[in-house]
Every structure is written in C-alpha cells, then in structure tokens.
C-alpha cells in the first residue's frame, strides 16, 4: 500500500504529463496556423486538397516556388503532428483521473486510520507484530531449506537429476518467488507490509460491523485481552457480538485471527 505522499506525487506527475500533452497539441496547432497564414498571404490556399492537406510537389510544380513547397510541407507536418498528439490526450487524461481516484481513496484511508478507535489500532499492531514474527521464522526456515538444496552439476545421473528437480520443486512450492523476495527484505519492510495488510483487514472488520449495527455508538463492552477481541458492539441500528478465533491449519501460510461478527 503506497503512502499518501507517494500517491500524491504520482498524481501530480500524471497531471503534469497531461498538461504537457495538451501544450504539445497546442504547439503543433500554432505551428500549423502560422504556416497557414503564410499560405493564405501568398494565395497558395487554392491548392488545398479535399483531405485538408497539400501535395507540396504539386504546389511547387504549379507555382515554381521552393518556398511554397517548404511551407505547405511544414503545414502538413504540423497538422499530422497535432492530430497524433490530440489522439494521445484522452489516455494521459484518464491516467491522471485514475490517480485522482487513488489519491482520494488514500485520503479516505488515512482519515479512517486516524479516526479508528484505539481498540482496533491495538488489533492492527498485534497482527503486524505477530505476522512479522512469523515472517522472521519463515525466513530462517527458508535459509535452512535453501542451504540443503543440491547443487547443479554436469554429468548427473538420472537419479541425481530427479533428486535435484524434486528438491528444487519442493523449495519453490514452499517459497514462491514473490514470497522469497519478500523474506529477503528487512524486518522494517516486513513490518510495514504486514501493518498495511493488518490495517486493511481491520478496516474490513469495521465495515462488516457497520453492516450489522449501522454507525458504531458504543465500544465499551468490547475487550481486547489475550490476543483476542471479544464483546458486544452497539450501533444506530442494532448490536453485534464480536468473537475472535485463531485460524490456521493445512494450506494456511500463517496463523491469523479470524473475527466473527454475529
């Protein structure tokens, strides 16, 4: 999840590119107009074709003027360049608008996090620390598993090649490339990544609670003890029971806390 200031920087860059594209289109339009004024002043506009451009060779042949060839050629070039630049404007404009949406969403997320009740912030901190501890242990497990991988060598027997393939396939199944790359990062990187994931997880929890109770009015009966969030939430349209269970087991990458909203 990108930081708010990073999203804003991307949005500003996209806006600058959009405005630069508009300015480029205008530059070619001005160039075409400048050459058109010269064409009109010399009476060469009568050679304009139905497609809106000139055939400079025909103009030169009719007028005997190298300048007529040069100016009508430049006019055609400017008109074509303006049209090409104009076609690119919607794309860069849309890129900018997409970043505006992302920025507004990031603003909302930042506001939601700032206004998040402390008890939910505590859940975020717990999950971030728990998941980072899990990552540290997984990193050590990855290192040990990688150290035991057989090295490739020329002239391997069929059995050695099969063992080499089996071991490396098992390693990659346990640690896909994106997971391996993450675990190679610093503890600070892992914590920030887990904190971002935990924030989204808790935001989703709050959303599910609000779907049950409307706007939350009372959290006094919610307690956060022993790594569990339990109790009753009161809202404008009703109440909900919150219960935390520890989730894990086969094919679960890491233990996590599943919060049930009843």
Image: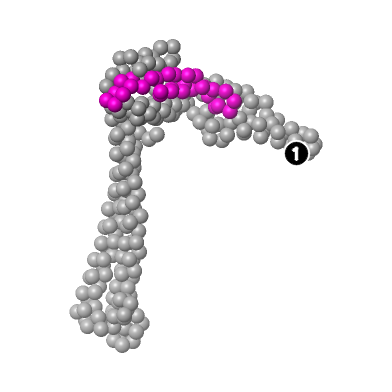
Image vertical order of residue 61 relative to residue 36, above or below: below
- Depth check: 132 or 46 in front? 132
Is residue 7 shown above or below 188? below
- Judging by the rendered image, the residue that carries numbered circle 1 is 154
Task: Name the quarter where the N terminus is drawn.
Answer: top left
Secondary structure, mark 1, is: loop
Colour mapping used in the image:
one colour
* Image point (43%, 22%), residue name: 259
Residue 132 is at least partly visible in this image:
no
Q: What span is colored magenta in the figure?
A: 233-262
Most prominent secondary structure in the magenta stretch? strand
- Residue closest to the eye, 236 or 58: 236
User: Does 204 appear above or below 73?
Assistant: above
Asked whether, in this view, residue 214 is left or right of residue 169, the answer is: left
Image quadrant in which the C terminus is located: top left
Q: Position of residue 251 (x, y in %)?
A: 58, 28
């Amino acid at each position: 999840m990108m930081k708010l200031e990073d999203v804003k920087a991307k949005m500003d860059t996209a806006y600058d590119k959009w405005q630069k594209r508009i300015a480029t289109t205008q530059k070619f339009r001005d160039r075409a107009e400048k050459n058109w004024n010269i064409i009109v002043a010399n009476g060469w506009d009568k050679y304009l074709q139905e497609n809106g451009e000139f055939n400079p060779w025909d103009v030169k042949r009719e007028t005997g003027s190298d300048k007529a060839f040069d100016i009508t050629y430049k006019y055609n070039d400017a008109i074509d360049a303006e049209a090409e630049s104009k076609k690119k404007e919607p794309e860069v404009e849309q890129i900018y608008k997409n970043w505006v949406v992302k920025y507004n969403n990031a603003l909302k997320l930042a506001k939601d996090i700032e206004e998040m009740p402390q008890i939910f912030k505590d859940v975020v901190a717990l999950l971030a620390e728990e998941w980072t501890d899990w990552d540290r242990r997984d990193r050590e497990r990855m290192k040990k598993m990688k150290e035991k991988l057989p090295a490739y060598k020329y002239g391997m027997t069929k059995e050695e090649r099969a063992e080499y393939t089996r071991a490396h396939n098992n390693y990659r199944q346990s640690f896909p490339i994106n997971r391996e790359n993450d675990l190679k990062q610093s503890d600070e990187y892992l914590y920030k990544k887990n904190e971002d994931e935990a924030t989204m997880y808790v935001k989703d929890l709050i959303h599910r609670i609000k779907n049950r109770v409307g706007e939350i009015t009372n959290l006094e009966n919610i307690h956060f003890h022993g790594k569990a969030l339990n109790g009753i939430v009161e809202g404008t349209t009703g109440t909900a029971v919150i219960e935390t269970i520890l989730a894990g087991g086969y094919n679960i990458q890491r233990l996590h806390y599943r919060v049930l909203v009843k």
